[in-house]
Image: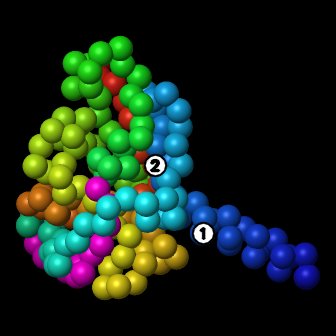
Amino acid sequence: MKYFTILFVFLTVILQAQKNSVTVKGDIDKTVTVTDGDLKKYPVHEVKSIDILNHKMEFKKNLKNLKGVLLKDVLSQVSFNTPTPKELSTFYLVCRAEDGYKVVYSWNEVFNTEAGDHVMLITSENGVPTSGTKEGITLITPEDRATGRRYVKNLSEIVIKKAD
């Protein structure tokens, strides 16, 4: 029984650590794992209140007092596999949650539009850090109309791909 308890605690710690990190991989020079601790190194941005609306524009919930970091700041450390900057326009990002839910952004959308200036990885809500919560690291695009479509709870990985 003692060994079972130790194993259970060990697995819980491993699963919790995975919930509090995001792996960035794909058509880049080197795979990067970003932890909730790493996110503290970036400039903090705030959103006072945002309604989460589904694809039918129906209200689902309201998030308040969000703090987070911009996705483009986090991805600024990533070196895309491309011989020229012109080809960056052919890249897209697949952001996947632990449960398999996926959303897609183009490179231009994140780095070259007003919307990209607001795509955030949420680090706290109502003053409570998201690390250790059931929703973990969360991705949100406040500028979207149907905000729920790209509201990714428990973000686990970002796969960077080049369109053929």
What is the three-letter code of the residue carrying label 1?
Gln
Image coordinates of residue 111 in percent, x first then y, are 21, 40
Total label count?
2
Q: Earlier in the sequence, mark 1 or mark 2?
A: 1
Q: Residue at x 48, y 73 (%)?
A: 131
Q: Callout 1 environment at 10 Å: few (<14), some (14 to 19), or many (20+)?
A: some
Question: Regarding mark 2 in the picture, which secondary structure is present there?
Answer: strand
Which image quadrant for residue 85? top left
Q: Residue at x 8, y 60 (%)?
A: 145
Question: Regarding mark 1 in the picture, which secondary structure is present there?
Answer: helix
According to the image, label 2 marks what residue? 157
Q: Is residue 24 visible?
A: yes
On screen, residue 30 above or below 145: above
Question: What colouring style does the render use?
Answer: rainbow
Is 144 on the left-hand or right-hand side of 92?
left
What is the three-letter code of the residue carrying label 2?
Glu
Q: Main secondary structure of the magenta part?
A: strand
Q: Which residues are magenta?
A: 58-70
Image coordinates of residue 44 in percent, x first then y, are 30, 66
Is 162 on the left-hand or right-hand side of 53?
right
Q: Tell which of 11 and 87 is nearer to you.
A: 87
Which image quadrant for residue 107? top left
Image coordinates of residue 11 in percent, x first then y, are 72, 68
Q: Residue at x 48, y 37 (%)?
A: 25
Which image quadrant for residue 162? top left
According to the image, label 1 marks what residue? 16
Say if the magenta span includes residue 96.
no
Q: Tell which of 110 and 93 is nearer to you.
A: 110
Is 46 on the left-hand or right-hand side of 12?
left
Q: Is residue 60 visible?
A: no
